Image (tube, rainbow, N blue to C red):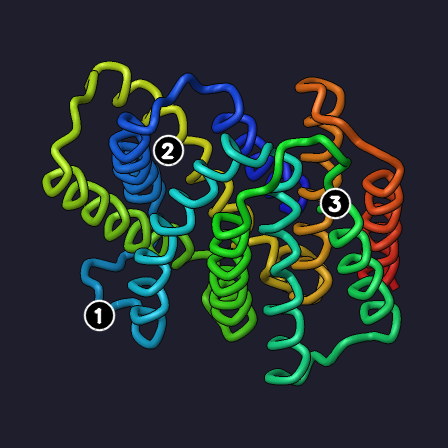
Amino acid sequence: MLIASLIFNLLVFLFFRLAPITDEERPAVIAVNYIAAFLWAFFSMSTAATSLTDLGPWLPYALGLGVLFIATFIGISKSVSENGMGITATAGKMSLVIPMLVMAFATSQGMHILQWAALALALGGIYLQSGRAEGEKKLYLPLLLAVFLGSGIIDTLFSWVSHHGLGSEMNAFFNAVIFGLSGILGLILLLIRRPKIRWGKAVLLGGVLGSINFGSVFYYLNSLNPKLSGFSTATALGMNNMGQVVGAALLGFFFFKEPMHPRQIAGFVCCLLALFLLGYVGGV
């Protein structure tokens, strides 16, 4: 579950780095993406759920996530093009401090002393990685802040519902509600803005992105469930986030020639140590 979650989440960043999407086309691609992800979730449902009320206490979480998803996704896509893949992933995953602290203090799980050490290493590493060398393009901080807050709240809600009993049989239905609402909001934005769009391209790219996005959310939600992943929610959350930071940094450096200066290399090593420490705690 953890490996699949990591792969699909990195594919989302790769898509935004590689896909030829203009600012005019981005809203349409993202709207189609959520419609495609909704269809994947709908047709993969094994539950007998037939209405929103079947989600019970999880319905408000699904509706809130539907709004947050499209807002944060737009922010991530713009930040990747403005700030680069590695820095955007770093900003998004620095938000792990929000759900890890919430899960530590609001549940009976608590946190192992080594998890606190890993969290300190992770935050230090992310801070070091976010530095820019003299002469490099300055970061667009409002986008990074939006990615940080949006990702943190999304991770917190996912962690909460996974820890408190959203079973695997309801996973696809839960995802379908999130994706469906995000798709509706995306279409409403298109009706308001009325941009000039090449719909053939938007449907093709949105369909590809939606398939990736469904996999990223499906496996991520399962990986946070201790019964399915074998790890505590806090450990799985940390490993997901740190794995994506390390993976995005490596992809950015080796394939897209995004520079890594001594300060950023030190930050990368801290994140790597945090990842191994979280993995060790999860295995003991």
Q: Judging from the image, what secondary structure is the residue with disc 1 in? A: helix
User: Mark 2 packing: few (<14 Cα in 10 Å), some, or many (20+)?
Assistant: many
Q: Are marks 2 and 1 in contact (CB under 8 Å)?
A: no
- The residue that appears at 89% across and 37% down in the rendered structure is 262
Q: Badges 2 and 3: C-beta atoms under 8 Å apart?
A: no
- Residue 210 figure quarter: top left
The residue indicated by pointer 3 is: 131
**Image location (x, y in percent) of residue 52:** 21, 64
Side (left or right) of 91 relative to 39: right
Whichever of callouts 2 and 1 sits on the residue coming sooner in the sequence is 1
Give the foreground label among 2 and 1: 2
Q: Position of residue 122 (x, y in %)?
A: 78, 57
Give coordinates of residue 242: x percent, y percent. Answer: 73, 49
Q: Quadrant of residue 260?
A: top right
Residue shown at 37% from the left, 57% from the top: 68
Name the kind of residue labelled 2 in the image: Gly
Q: Please identify, in this view, whether the residue under mark 1 or under mark 3 is nearer the observer.
A: 3
Image mark for residue 53: 1
